[in-house]
Image: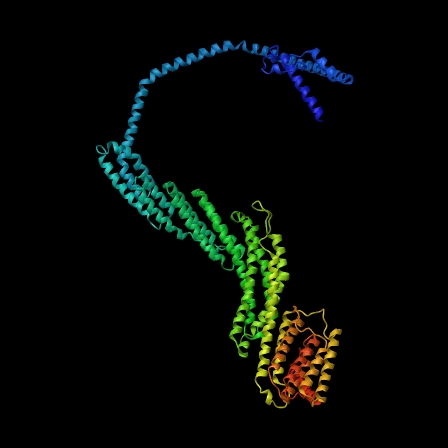
């Protein structure tokens, strides 16, 4: 295709050159070409073409087939050129025939035109002669009429001058001050020329009337009851009367500044009839600015400053308004009213800085609104959580309700914030559309800051509890802060929900509605980093869960400590029943169980008392207890060192049981951990005391009774039995005469206590 196009272009160029050379008046146009000396003599289209040299070159460069091909091409070109020349001649022949016919028609049409032109010239000369005769006859009368007309006009002006004082008086009565000023300024040239002679009285009377008019106009300018438009018109009339304009400008500008108080914006009533009232006030203010600028063209800076003060007052009100709990429709309604006012002011003052400053103020207002939305969301979450701290416990506000309300506030409240802010992006308000990219950044950064501050808010409860715990040194102080463990448990589960569920879903919503591509020439990076925040909340949840366990354990440990510190164990009497401290211990565990059931799920992967290892460990523990009791009864007469040696040897052959394991977010794990810690504390308290036989038997009775209700509470019976045995061992080691109770007596006391518990329903889980 490229070769064919090249051949066609070459052919067209050659045809054009041939036609130009054929019709050119100069035989050889190329002879005048300054570059003709550079044309090759073998160029077949040039005037200096040499056939012999061309044939030599063709014979040297081409073979026989090439020469034959060239011959065929040249024959075809010659035929085409002949055809083109023939067509060109035919076309020119037709044009020549048409031109000949046209010339003939022109000659036939022009033949009678010369006679008509001569007749027309004769008629024009006749009209001219008659016009000259008429002008000659009417010349004297015309001059007389013109003289009388000038005299009439002069008399009319004189009459107007004499009637001017009366006209001005009528204008004063009808308050037509514009007509009065027009009449007086029109008469000023005559007064300047003849005011001291012929029209002296008229001039004096007119000046007295004008003085009254000036006074009345000043009153209108400085009157508070008059509108700004009326004041501006009065100022224009005073300016036409050469009244000092600087004084007028200062006074009128002061009035204009005072009128700013009438132009107000009340966001709370923006949806009612308020827009019509505001519309009337801003229209009057804008018209006053327009009139003021017409009267005083050099007052642009003062007017711009005045308009800027008005907009500043607007946005101060808006910033205070967005700090309240409002929705995006309320904010958009206020911004739409303000932006319409800005466009009117810019149209009048022609200053782009007003719109730029308004855009900056709108940016601050929208950013403050987004920050306020997240603040109110955090306040809602805190309100639901703080209800847990109310005195009265679960009867007034259950933990399950508090957790559900907090989760709803975090997730649904967060999504509602996103939907509300997205309405701002969907609106077609011009000033908001310019902030689209910034709003997306503010929302993502706002969520980042929101979760950071929420974590700090959660941890502040931890700090508050630690400070209160350090100030409370006894049981009464711990009871005063009994609501804090409930709050720590709710915070633990809420933090886990935020880290595992809420943040991933909110991240999806942000990616769907508040994400953009590249900006500023670089790849856009999300301001919201979900991975880091999720990790922080998961860690915070573990801290709160451990805090709950520590507080519950500390409370029970205080009970146990008081139990061991109060009596004199060396002089203890024979046991008659299970001690009251055991009831308090079980009550605290019941309270803990009820709390975790409201918040934490059950561990469905574990089954109590169904694990083979646990059963084996429990059977071994039971066999160990039976052997230990038999050992105690049969070896009463043995030495104390012999008994301790046998006890330690028995512990060596007992299966190893893990006491402290990782706490999971399940009911069983939390309760088991608290029981382990409490029993471990019980063991340590036993090691600090010295028991007589009766004291040791009281500990034996209490521990043996605990085995039955604790089996209904904990999941790891092996660990529980191990820790209870450790308490017995510690009591044996610290007993002066470690002789246990007889089994019938022990069973009778335990059964009596169990019957009492069943009666009062104290051991139900």
Q: Nearer the viewer, residue 656 or 744?
A: 656
Q: Is residue 623 above or below residue 240?
A: below
Q: Is residue 582 above or below residue 18?
A: below
Question: Which residue lies at the image location 56% right of the left edge and 56% below the top edge?
Answer: 420
Q: Measured from the top left, where is residue 408 in percent x and y? A: 60, 63
Q: Quadrant of the N terminus?
A: top right
Q: Measured from the top left, where is residue 155 in percent x and y? A: 28, 30
Q: Measured from the top left, where is residue 14 in percent x and y? A: 67, 17
Quarter of the image where one finds residue 675 = bottom right
Asked if residue 477 lies left or right of residue 148, the reply is right
Q: Quadrant of the C terminus?
A: bottom right
Q: Nearer the viewer, residue 709 or 505?
A: 709
Quarter of the image where one finds residue 752 = bottom right
Asked if residue 467 lies left or right of residue 612, the reply is left
Question: Which residue lies at the image location 34% right of the left edge and 18% below the top edge?
Answer: 138
Quarter of the image where one finds residue 636 = bottom right
Asked if residue 250 lies left or right of residue 678, the reply is left
Q: Residue furthest right?
A: 65
Q: Nearer the viewer, residue 379 or 685?
A: 685
Question: Which residue lies at the image location 47% right of the left edge and 55% below the top edge?
Answer: 319
Q: Is residue 284 visible?
A: no
Q: Nearer the viewer, residue 359 or 209?
A: 359
Number of numbered tags placed on the structure image: 0
């Amino acid at each position: 295709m490229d070769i064919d196009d090249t051949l066609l272009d070459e052919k067209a160029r050659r045809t054009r050159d041939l036609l130009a050379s054929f019709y050119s008046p100069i035989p050889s146009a190329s002879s005048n070409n300054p570059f003709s000396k550079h044309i090759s003599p073998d160029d077949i289209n040039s005037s200096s073409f040499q056939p012999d040299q061309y044939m030599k070159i063709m014979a040297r460069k081409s073979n026989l087939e090439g020469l034959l091909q060239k011959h065929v091409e040249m024959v075809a070109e010659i035929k085409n050129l002949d055809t083109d020349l023939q067509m060109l001649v035919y076309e020119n022949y037709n044009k020549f025939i048409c031109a000949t016919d046209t010339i003939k028609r022109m000659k036939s049409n022009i033949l009678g035109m010369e006679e008509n032109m001569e007749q027309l010239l004769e008629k024009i000369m006749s009209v001219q002669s008659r016009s000259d005769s008429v002008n000659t006859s009417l010349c004297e009368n015309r001059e007389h009429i013109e003289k009388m007309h000038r005299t009439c006009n002069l008399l009319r002006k004189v009459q107007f001058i004499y009637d001017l004082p009366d006209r001005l008086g009528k204008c004063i009565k009808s308050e037509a001050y514009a007509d009065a000023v027009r009449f007086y300024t029109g008469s000023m040239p005559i007064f300047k020329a003849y005011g001291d002679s012929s029209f002296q009285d008229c001039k004096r009377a007119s000046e007295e009337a004008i003085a009254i008019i000036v006074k009345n106009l000043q009153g209108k300018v400085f009157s508070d009851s008059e509108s700004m438009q009326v004041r501006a018109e009065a100022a224009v009339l005073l300016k036409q009367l050469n009244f000092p304009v600087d004084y007028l400008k200062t006074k009128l500008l002061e009035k204009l500044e005072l009128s700013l108080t009438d132009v107000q914006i009340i966001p709370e009533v923006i949806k009612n009839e308020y827009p019509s009232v505001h519309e009337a006030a801003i229209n009057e203010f804008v018209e006053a600015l327009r009139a003021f600028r017409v009267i005083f063209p050099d007052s642009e800076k003062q007017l711009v400053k005045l308009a800027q003060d008005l907009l500043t007052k607007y946005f101060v009100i808006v910033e205070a308004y967005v700090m309240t709990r409002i929705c995006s429709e309320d904010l958009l309604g206020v911004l739409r009213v303000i932006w319409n006012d800005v466009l009117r002011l810019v149209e009048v003052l022609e200053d782009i800085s007003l719109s730029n400053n308004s855009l900056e103020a709108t940016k601050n207002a929208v950013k403050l609104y987004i920050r306020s939305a997240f603040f109110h969301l955090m306040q809602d979450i805190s309100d639901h959580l703080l209800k847990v701290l109310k005195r009265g416990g679960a009867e007034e506000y259950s933990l399950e309700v508090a957790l559900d309300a907090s989760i709803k506030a975090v997730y649904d409240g967060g999504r509602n914030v996103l939907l509300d802010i997205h309405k701002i992006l969907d609106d077609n308000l011009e000033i908001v559309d310019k902030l689209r990219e910034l709003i997306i950044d503010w929302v993502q950064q706002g969520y980042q800051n929101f979760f950071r501050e929420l974590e700090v808010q959660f941890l502040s409860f931890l700090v508050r509890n630690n400070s209160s715990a350090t100030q409370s040194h006894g049981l009464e102080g711990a009871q005063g802060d009994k609501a804090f463990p409930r709050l720590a448990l709710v915070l633990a589960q809420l933090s886990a929900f935020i880290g595992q569920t809420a943040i991933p879903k909110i991240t999806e919503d942000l990616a769907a509605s508040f994400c953009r591509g590249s900006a500023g020439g670089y790849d856009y990076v999300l301001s919201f980093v979900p991975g880091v925040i999720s990790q922080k909340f998961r860690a915070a949840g573990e801290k709160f869960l451990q805090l709950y366990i520590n507080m519950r354990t500390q409370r029970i440990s205080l009970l146990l400590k008081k139990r061991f510190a109060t009596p004199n164990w060396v002089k203890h009497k024979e046991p008659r029943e299970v001690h009251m401290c055991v009831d308090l211990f079980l009550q605290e565990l019941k309270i803990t169980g009820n709390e975790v059931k409201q918040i934490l799920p059950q561990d469905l992967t574990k089954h109590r008392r169904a694990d083979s290892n646990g059963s084996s460990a429990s059977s071994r523990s039971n066999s160990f207890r039976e052997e230990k009791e038999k050992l105690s009864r049969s070896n009463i007469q043995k030495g104390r060192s012999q008994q301790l040696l046998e006890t330690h040897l028995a512990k060596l052959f007992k299966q190893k049981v893990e006491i402290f394991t990782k706490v999971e977010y399940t009911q069983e794990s939390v309760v088991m951990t608290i029981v382990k810690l409490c029993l471990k504390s019980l063991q340590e308290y036993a090691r600090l005391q010295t028991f007589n036989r009766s004291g040791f038997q009281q500990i034996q009775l209490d521990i043996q009774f605990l085995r039955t209700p604790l089996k209904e509470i904990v999941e790891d019976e092996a660990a529980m039995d191990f820790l209870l045995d450790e308490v017995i061992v510690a009591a044996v080691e610290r007993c002066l005469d470690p002789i246990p109770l007889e089994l019938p007596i022990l069973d009778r006391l335990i059964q009596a206590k169990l019957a009492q518990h069943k009666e009062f329903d104290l051991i139900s889980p």
